[in-house]
Image: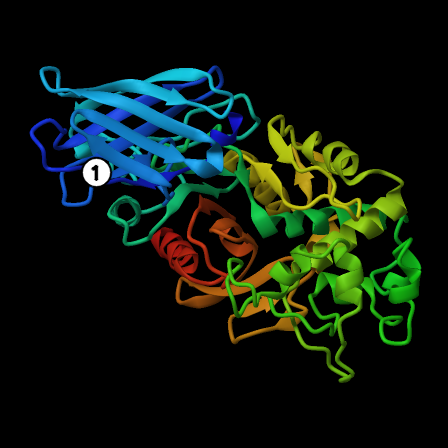
Amino acid sequence: MRNISFILLIGLGCTSSPQTPSGSYLGLLKFPDITYHIYLDCSGQVPVVLNTTFKAQQFSLDTIYFSHDSLHFRLHDFYSEYKGKFNKALNRIEGQWIGEDSVKYPLDFISVKSDTVSGLTPRIPRTYSYQPPAQQKDSITVCNRTRENLDSVEMDSLLQQIIDQKFQDVHSLLIARHNCLAVEEYFYRYDKNFVYNIQSATKSVVSALTGIALQNQEIKSVNETLCQNLTGYEALACNAQNKDITLHHLLTMSTGIAWDEQTYDYTDARNTSVMAANEKDQFVYLLSLPRSKTDTLPFAYNSLNHSLMNAVLRNATHLENKQELTDRLLKPLGIEKSYIDQPSPMGTIGDIGLRPRDMLKFGLMYLNEGRWQGKQIVPAQWVRESTTTKVQLTATLGYGYFWWTKEFRWKDKPVKSFFAWGYGGQYIFVVPDADLVVVMSGSRWTTNPEGQAMQIVQTVLSAIE
């Protein structure tokens, strides 16, 4: 039954019989480590069931029906089903969830008003009211936004737009100025303890680890070749086509290898990353693709570059990726709760999970040129070098060493920033001239790093008096 640790939206059908319910119902499916909030809406022609544990997402059922006063639905993919009966006198559905292990869990649906169910909308109540962040035992200083000269009217308007879903699928927004957390807001049923898969924002973490390895002389230079550093793949990394690929090429997404990860979504089979995921060894697949022979190699965003860099780091540091990440970044930053995936068949870890406040720590460290709590964790020179534009993509968007760069407007002048970006809306923005760090998490799935997050950061900059 542990397979139910998903966020689900279940399509359901009711009949209009007097023996069946009408309106909205909420059920709590309780396990030792989590309680799932499952919402049943029988107010329309086609009733639905949603899991509002965090934020509702679509989930399909194999079977769903009411027979007289009995409700039954089945989830074949999870080997689970629900059986319940409608108690008209109490206006509730009483029944059991039966898991794949045949264990029965009590699950009753109780009548509720839809506008009282958190998880269906970003915030209840739906009118924003600012509260300063609470001080936690995590070494992050907190303060009131007025102290940091953030205009109350503009900030209230921004947060209200998130609640009204003008900005969609935002789960958290944290704003720090002058090393002080002034705004900390969570939406739907997410909170400060939720560990997010930060997706490709992990690449910026790998960039930090690269800087540390360079300082330790474990890697001599970003101009070293992949051929010199990719143990076990020399036949492909050192062949005539690939022998001059450097670590600089990896870090700037400019290896010249034919790759298209941004034209199509990650659910589309035409996305090269999706094709590679179906291969037994993705490094063999990648290094066997054709490579451009032009003098100026094109930018091609490639998530396997991050995996290749992790392989280089593992070889150079003689540390498994998880240990290196933990010892060199997580522990020094005081990050006690995270998620690190098991190594891939190539022996490297992929994306990691962090809480929003821990994402903020990483951003604050970069705002302070690699320092945290008085200790230099990432070399200052590497922070400056890695966040400087190496590839100019548009007039205002560029790419450094596993960091995106962006030009905003502040006080009627252009201002430079750099940011980590992960699929779904995981962002860490740093604007040094404004002494500003903005962190966001979400579920707005797009392969374009630009979008509503840029509007939010621009609004924050405009709100600084």
Left/right placement of residue 94 relative to residue 447 reads left
Q: Residue 60: x percent and y percent?
A: 37, 44
Q: Residue at x 57, y 27 (%)?
A: 139
Q: Secondary structure at mark 1?
A: loop
Depth check: give the residue in front, 360 or 141.
360
Q: Residue 263: x percent and y percent?
A: 53, 70
User: What is the total number of numbered labels drawn onto the structure image?
Assistant: 1
Q: Residue at x 68, y 69 (%)?
A: 390
Depth check: give the residue in front, 455 or 112.
112
Q: Tell me if residue 168 comes above or below residue 376 in the rendering.
A: below
Q: Tell me if residue 91 comes above or below residue 236 in the rendering.
A: above
Depth check: give the residue in front, 386 or 327.
327
Depth check: give the residue in front, 393 or 92.
92
Left/right placement of residue 73 relative to residue 316 reads left
Is residue 216 at least partly visible in the picture? Answer: no
Q: Tell me if residue 393 comes above or below residue 96 in the rendering.
A: below
Q: Residue 280: x percent and y percent?
A: 75, 53
Q: To which quarter of the image does residue 83 belong?
A: top left
Q: Residue at x 68, y 46 (%)?
A: 350
Identify the coloring: rainbow
Label 1 environment density (alpha carbons within 10 Å; few <14, some 14–19, many ≥20): few
| Residue occupying the far front of the picture | 67
Q: Which residue is mark 1?
A: 126
Q: Residue 74: x percent and y percent?
A: 37, 33
The amino acid sitting under disc 1 is Arg
